[in-house]
Amino acid sequence: MRRSEPARARDARAADAALPDIVRDDAAGVAEASSGTHTLERALQLLKVFHGSAKPLTHAELVRRTGYSKASVSRLTATLVALGYLDRAPDGVRVQIGVRGLRLGHKYLANSPIPGIVRGIMQDFADRFDMSVGLAVPDQLDMIYIQYCNGRKIATLRLGVGRTVPMALSSIGRAYVWSQPPEERQRLLFGIWKKSGEHGPQVVARMERAFGDLDTHGYCLAAGEYQRDTFAISVPLALGNPPRPMGLNCSAVGPLPDRVMIRDELAPALMKTARLLTLELEGVDSSLF
């Protein structure tokens, strides 16, 4: 005979009461940990939208960039301000990266062996060609610069250490994705397609054209996609022991140089720089990066 709903409810309560306290405590702990992890992920995602810049943002801008509700943004910003990871701007409305947020980045740079080892090699290239040279690692579907050198005369690209660029729109991101094993490459492409919405097919098609250049020439180009009136040339590389995949690029404001110059001068020099960096860091523990 089928039992009534009240009977099943009583049985469920009785079964729960029969559980040892430690089982119920463990279940509650798992739920609490899951909730805390979710909140932490959302807070870190909110910090990420500043893209390495201390520029103040309004709550409305944070809602737009994160997709969170107004209530969630208000709660998260209030908590992050209280903890010192965000500060209120002088107008009392906008928020910006706080001292503790900046301190995390500086601690990373202070503890990483990369800047001291690679700066001279990268600066030599930057001075020789009067360009910017950047070394970047992946951060979800972005690339974040961990070292950046400028030539003496170059106009600013509004980039530098700690700034991020999208994998989908940057040659350095495309070079990194190309260097990944097939399964990971497809996972990244799927994520980029999904994130790009209705533009996903065109975005992925441009990336695959860059993969063709990397297959044939060992480098890829991008012009005016992430920043107007700029260009970049990028190569993949893997540094340290065990090798950690990264991307290296050179870039400048202005039209794309003559392809003969790219083929015969810039690209070979950039690939040589990548080889020099690989040799310099081949014995360094990549877990320190």
Image (tube, rainbow, N blue to C red):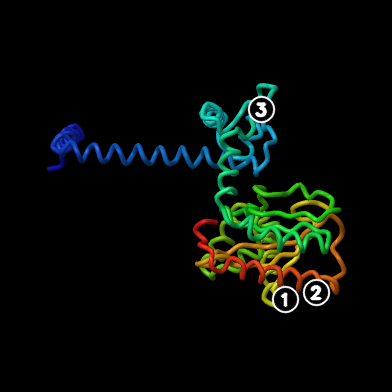
Q: Earlier in the sequence, mark 1 or mark 3?
A: 3
Q: Secondary structure at mark 3?
A: loop
Quadrant showing the C terminus: bottom right
* Residue 272 versus residue 246 in the image, above or below: below
Residue nearer the viewer, 24 or 165: 165
Quick check: 247 above or below 269? above
Q: Amino acid at mark 1?
A: His
Marks 1/2: CA distance? Answer: 9 Å
Task: Tell me where residue 220 appears, x and y as whole percent.
Answer: 72, 68
Residue matched to label 3: 94
Q: Amino acid at mark 3?
A: Arg
Which residue is drawn at the image coordinates 60% and 52% (left, top)? 195
263 lies left or right of 26:
right
> Which of the two labelled residues, at mark 1 and mark 2, occupies the earlier sequence position?
1
Q: Is residue 67 visible?
A: no
Of labels 3 and 2, earlier in sequence is 3
Q: Quadrant of residue 69?
A: top right
Can residue 52 be seen in this snapshot? yes
Residue lying at the far bottom in this picture: please name it: 216
The residue at 67%/37% (across/down) is: 54
User: Secondary structure under badge 1?
Assistant: helix
The residue carrying mark 1 is 217
**Mark on residue 263?**
2
- The Cα–Cα distance between marks 1 and 3, rounded to whole angstroms, is 46 Å
Whether label 1 touches label 2, CB < 8 Å: yes
Which residue is at 51% across, 67% downward? Answer: 241
Residue 168 shown left or right of residue 184 in the figure: right
Asked whether, in this view, residue 202 is left or right of residue 177, the answer is: right
Contact, mark 3 vs mark 2 (Cβ under 8 Å): no
Q: CA distance from mark 3 to mark 2?
A: 47 Å
